[in-house]
Structure formats: structure tokens, C-alpha cells
Amino acid sequence: MFDDVPVVAAVFAVVAAIIHGYIFVMESILWTTPRVRATFGVASAQEAQTTRALAFNQGWYNLFLAIGTVTGIVLATSGDVAVRGAGVGILLLATGSMVAAALVLVVSNPRMARAAAVQGLAPLVAVVLTLTMR
């Protein structure tokens, strides 16, 4: 069942999808709450309102990456060889995009290294294991 994506890689990919799903909730639904404002370093309720539309849009990007990751895993465990190959490609595109976004975050703002690690480590492990353990 997991010939094209090793189980351990799939586990890290699912963890990455969950993290990005949670980021979606924070950015698109809870952005103006005090806890989320503190998490993202938003100084005031007014600043949160000003940036709400940007955060809402960004949250959806995170959700789409999570959906792509889960879709890739589902397809990669299909019985059809061609579908499995497409699933691996989708999985690598989604998790690779998560890693790239984490790199952009840390390069653009080194103070966000912890946040970049949270968003980028699990998908990085998933990518490496998918490519090396097949």
C-alpha cells in the first residue's frame, strides 16, 4: 500500500498538513483574537483589522497546501500505478511548497526562524524520506 511513499514519510506529511490546517484557522478565522495576534506579533486590534484581508488570503494558501498533501498521500496509496505516481508528484509539490515558504519566511525575517522551523521541518522530512526511501 505504501510502496511509493514510505509510511514514515506519510506520517510527517500528515503532520505538516495538520500544522498548515491549523495555520489556516489562525490566519483566516481567528486572526483578530488576542492569542493569535500575540502569536504572529500583531501589536494591536487595529493592526489586526488592517491586515485581516491579507491574513485571510494567506491562510487559504496554507489550507490548499494541506489539502494537496493529503490528496497526494491518498492518491499515492492507490492501487493504480499511474495514479500513485501522480500522488507522489502532488505530495512532493505540496510539501516542497511548504518548505519553500518556510525558507522565504526565515530569509525575509530571521527573527521568524522558530515559526519557519514549525512550518517547514515536517514537510522537509517528508520530502527527504519520500525521495530517499522509495
Image (spheres, helix red, strand yellow):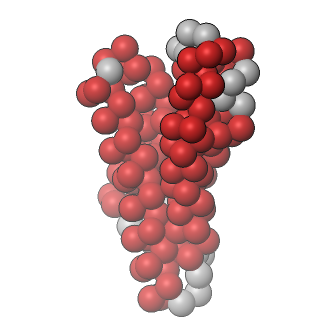
Residue 110 % position (x, y):
31, 18
Quarter of the image where the N terminus is located: bottom right
Q: Nearer the viewer, residue 14 or 111?
A: 111
Residue 106 in sight from this viewpoint: yes
Residue 66 % position (x, y):
57, 54
Residue depicted at x 73% and y 21%: 33
Residue 13 in sight from this viewpoint: no
In this rendering, position of residue 123 left or right of residue 24: left
Indicate the quadrant where residue 86 lies: bottom left
Q: Nearer the viewer, residue 14 or 62?
A: 62
35, above or below 15, in the image = above
In this rendering, position of residue 85 left or right of residue 11: left
Residue 61 % position (x, y):
51, 50
Residue depicted at x 71% and y 31%: 30
Indicate the quadrant where residue 29 lies: top right
Residue 17 % position (x, y):
59, 49
Determine the residue located farthest toward the top in the rendered image.
43
Residue depicted at x 46% and y 63%: 91
Q: Nearer the viewer, residue 9 or 60?
A: 60
Residue depicted at x 38% and y 21%: 113
Q: Nearer the viewer, residue 121 or 112?
A: 112
Determine the residue located farthest toward the left in the rendered image.
107
